[in-house]
Image (cartoon, rainbow, N blue to C red):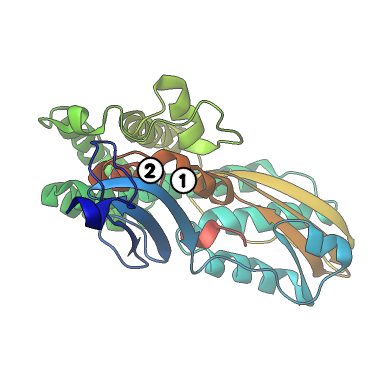
Amino acid sequence: MIEVTKDLPRSADGLQMDWLEVPFGPVFPGLPGGLKLTLTLDGDGVTEGQATSLVGMATEGEGSEESQESEGSQESEEMDADTFIEHLASAIPLAPVSYRLLACLAIEQAAGLSDDQATTQARNSALERERIASHLGWLAQSGRQLGFAWLTQRASTLQLKVRDAGRDRIAELEPELRTLGTRLERTPLLKSRLKGIGVLPVDSSDLRGPVARAAEDGGDAWARLWQRLDEIAASLELLKSGEEPELPVLRDIGNASGTGKATVDTPRGEARLSLKLEHGKVKSYKLDTACSHHIDLVPKLVEGQELGDALLAVGSLDLSPWEVIS
């Protein structure tokens, strides 16, 4: 045995074993579909890992030299404004309202339109409704990883109820939503399972959304869970004082030309869009998303962890493969 294993890498426990490269995904319980996680295993320990998206948006067309050198730049055939909005919303199915709103705001700025308070409030209500639904979807996914069938069932059922609900219906669902948070707080061993898992490296940069806000309170999977529960509660309060949620629809821009940019705090963090509008058509655009940065956290989060902890750490980031710009 000594002769057979003498040239193999040495594990943390002193044993010498074969290192195996194992793929998880693009369909794996507890991880979003379309995300491929490749881990190198030393027994049940992870020596290194990498996450890639198999469904993310890619640069289209030839583009200019400047466009090709800029990450996330898109330059292709012109699209009229409404077609572009539908294209962006359908390309990112886990947050279509957020990206529809982002496109509307950037195009309207390029067209020189000023803010309309009533429209803005209705759009923001739709955004907060999507935030609640998105966080519920993440809770359902986490339930699969943790083996909590009750959480998966409850969160996914509430997600479907909230997704297209009006203000009155969401008000009716509020007690159920708050009860879910209370039950999670009282779930035995949940804190001990998540506390200290997926602690962000001290040199992490460009964090956004719940991941960034949770970094101020421990920066682990437990903090990210409670950050999203807090955001559900905050969104419920905003919906009470806001307008009836309305799907963002582009206002009349005529045959306008110009450049515009916008930022929207999506459920996973800030997304930024800049574009060039020519005679009512989107000529080119550049999109920057939170998940394009958060996916780079995976190697440091999984290195040196046990397999189960590594999977929980990646799941706690709530990566959307469709929001990874390649």
**Distance CA(mark 1)–CA(mark 2):** 6 Å
Residue 259, picture quadrant: bottom right
Q: Is residue 270 left or right of residue 62?
A: left
Residue at 49 percent of width and 63 percent of height: 53
* 30 relative to 59, above or below: above
* 26 relative to 156, above or below: below
Residue 58 coordinates in the image, percent (x, y): 64, 68
Give the residue type at disc 2: Val
In the image, 206 versus 273, the foreground residue is: 206
Residue 69 coordinates in the image, percent (x, y): 80, 59
Are the residues tagged 1 and 2 within 8 Å (C-beta)? yes
Query: Residue 37 shows which numbered tag?
Result: none
Residue at 69 percent of width and 69 percent of height: 59
Q: Secondary structure at mark 2?
A: helix
The N terminus, quarter of image: bottom left
Query: Residue 299 shows which numbered tag?
Result: 1
